[in-house]
Image (cartoon, grey):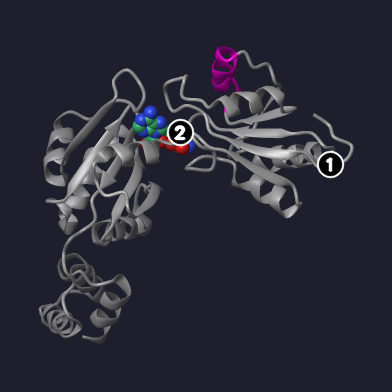
Amino acid sequence: MVDAAAPNGSLYVVSTPIGNLRDITLRAIDVLRTVDLILAEDTRHSRHLLDHHEISTPMLSYHEHNEARATATAIARLREGRDVALISDAGTPLVSDPGSRVVRAAAEAGIAVVPIPGPSAALAALVSSAISSERFTFFGFLARKGRERDDALQELSSLRHTSVLYEAPNRVAATLTELGARGAGERRVVVARELTKQFEEIHRGTVAELSAYYESSPPRGEVVIVLEGTTLQPLAEDELRSRARVMRDAGLSARDVAAALVREGGASRNLAYRLAHEA
Ligand code: SAM
C-alpha cells in the first residue's frame, strides 16, 4: 500500500478478541490483511489469530522491552509510505498494554493514527456488571504494594462513581479484603471472569461476600473487577475538623486521621490531608 501522493503511511491501532476469535470486526480483518507490517506484542500468540482469519501479513514484535527500537522501525516504515497496524495479545492496545510510545511518535511525526475499535475487557465487564456505567474510572492493574497501592485503594474506596480494574486471579480475594477494610464492604462489586470464553462468569455480590468467597476458592482465568461508587454523603467541613481534632488528641498520626476522614467522613483526599495537619 504505497501511495506516491501521500508520503506517510497510516498507523492503525487495531483491537483484537479477548477470548472468542470471532470477536473481530470486518474492518480489523481488512486492515490486518492489507497493511505492510503488523506490530504484535507476542508474534507467536498473534499468529494463531492471524492464521484463523487467513492473514499472512508480516509481523514485528513490539513489547515493553523493545518499544524504543520497534517504534523507530515502525516510524521509518510509515515515513516510506507503508501502512502499519498495532495489535496486542488481546483486546485494545494501550489499555494496560504496550503501544503508547509508537502512537505518540507517530502523532509527533504528523503520521495519521487510525483507531479500529473492538473488544476491551474493561468495557465488556462494565456493561455486563449492572453497576452504573454513566461515569467510571479505569485503574488498570493496581500496584502490588507500597504507597502507590495504598493510595489507589484509598481512591477506590472513596470514589462516588464506578471503578474498573484488572486483577490477577490469585490477588482478587486480597484486593477485595483490603477494600472491605477501607469501608467498602457493603458496596456492590462484580468479578467478571473469562469474558467471551467457555467459562465466562459474571459474579455479583457485595465486597464482603465476594472477598469471603474467593478467599476459599480463588477464581481461575482472567478477571476484571467492577466496583460501585460510594453513596456515603460527605460530612460538613466543621464536623470533619472536629473529628480530626478528636482523633489527633487520641494520638493518631496525621496520615491515619486523613485516611479516616476520607473513609468514614467522605472527605476528599486534599481536604482530609489539610484538616488532619491543621488539627
Ligand atoms: N488490552 C486488554 C484489553 O483491552 O482488555 C487488556 C490487557 S491486560 C494485559 C490483561 C488483563 O485484562 C487481564 O489480566 C484481565 O484483567 C483482563 N482481561 C483480558 N481478557 C479478559 C477476559 N477474557 N476476561 C476477563 N478479563 C480479561
Pick the front one: 221 or 196: 196
Mark nearest the camera among 1 and 2 is 1
Q: Position of residue 98 (x, y in %)?
A: 56, 40
Q: Sort mark 2 into few (<14), some (14-19) or many (20+) by Cα contacts within 10 Å.
A: many
Task: Look at the image and tell me whether residue 66 can be seen.
Answer: no
* On screen, residue 71 above or below 254: above
* On screen, residue 270 above or below 161: below
Q: Amino acid at mark 2?
A: Pro
What's the residue at 73%, 39% (across, down)? Answer: 10
Q: Quadrant of residue 34?
A: top right
Residue that numbered label 1 is attached to: 6
Quarter the N terminus occupies: top right
Q: Sort mark 1 into few (<14), some (14-19) or many (20+) by Cα contacts within 10 Å.
A: few
* On screen, residue 90 above or below 69: above
- Ligand 1 occupies quarter: top left
Q: Which residues are magenta?
A: 42-53
Q: Secondary structure at mark 2?
A: loop
Task: Look at the image and tell me whether residue 229 can be seen.
Answer: yes
Q: Amino acid at mark 1?
A: Ala
Q: Is residue 208 left or right of residue 91?
A: left
Residue 119 image label: 2
Q: Position of residue 180 (x, y in %)?
A: 16, 51
Residue 162 image label: none
Q: Secondary structure at mark 1?
A: loop
* 87 magenta-colored: no
* On screen, residue 205 above or below 135: above
The reply to whether the residue tagged 2 has its Cβ within 8 angstroms of ligand 1 is yes
Q: Position of residue 18 (x, y in %)?
A: 44, 28
Q: Quadrant of residue 202?
A: top left
The answer to which of marks 1 and 2 sits earlier in the sequence is 1
